[in-house]
Amino acid sequence: MGEAVGIMGGTFDPIHFGHLVAAEEAWLRFGLGRVVFVANGEPPHKKGYPVTPAERRHEMVVLATASNPHFEASRIEVDRPGPSYAVDTLRALRAELGPGAKLYFITGVDAIAEIATWREPERLGELCEFIAVSRPGSGREALEGLGGQLAGRVHLLEIPGVAVSSTEVRRRAGAGESLRYLTPPAVARYIARCELYRNRGVV
């Protein structure tokens, strides 16, 4: 049996402590060898704000994960042209890690509930299992509608609530407010140094 690897994909605009807590809990509870963070190169779903360039978002992921020996940042989507689809990333990682590796895709329970809208959802279920992250006491109802091959391959992971979101971090950064205890200090310094999220209006 090969290594169990967590894949944490997302826009990470910016990465924050909520992402890191979820990855750490998944690593611990599912016996993962490591968690690979994959910043979307070109998010396929239209965002309601101008997305920060992929290179900068990847650099923030590198800074946020550097101190954790079982976290790593991958450039797989940053370096691949075109829209970033999870199924393409999982195919590439499967080819790289070999058939013996067990892949777990880590994401929020709300995203899992909408997986039918993702590209090739049934193929996703063949490539990996899913860890659906939610706050304690919530999330089960969102997964009740899953059917087919996906139904038995989704695991609910309830984690301590971390009341932070990328939207709030962008708002606070744009307003010049403190980001302390919302995102790692190295990421907060990077945001300030590069003047990210300034002059965007509503973000």
Image (cartoon, rainbow, N blue to C red):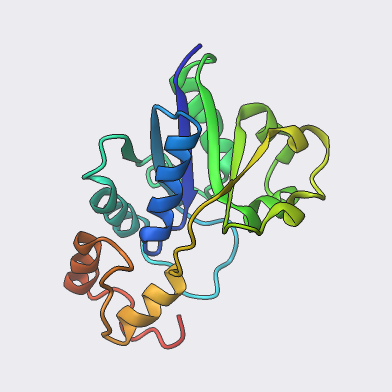
* Residue at 25% across, 35% down: 69
Relative image position of residue 147 (x, y in whole percent)? 83, 41
The C terminus: image quadrant: bottom left
Q: Which residue is more in the foreground, 31 or 117?
A: 31
* Residue at 31% across, 87% down: 175
The relative height of residue 115 versus residue 154 in the rendered view (above or below) is below
* Residue at 31% across, 34% down: 70
Q: Which residue is more in the foreground, 181 or 107?
A: 181
> How many marks overall?
0
Relative image position of residue 195 (x, y in whole percent)? 23, 76
Q: Is residue 65 left or right of residue 30?
A: left
Q: Is residue 114 left or right of residue 60?
A: right
Q: Is residue 59 left or right of residue 94?
A: left
Q: Which residue is more in the foreground, 18 or 149?
A: 18
* Residue at 68% across, 27% down: 126
The relative height of residue 84 versus residue 165 in the rendered view (above or below) is above
Q: Which residue is more in the foreground, 33 or 173?
A: 33
The relative height of residue 48 versus residue 31 in the rendered view (above or below) is below
The relative height of residue 194 versus residue 5 in the rendered view (above or below) is below
Quarter-of-image position of residue 127: top right
Relative image position of residue 19 (x, y in whole percent)? 42, 55
Relative image position of residue 131 (x, y in whole percent)? 58, 41
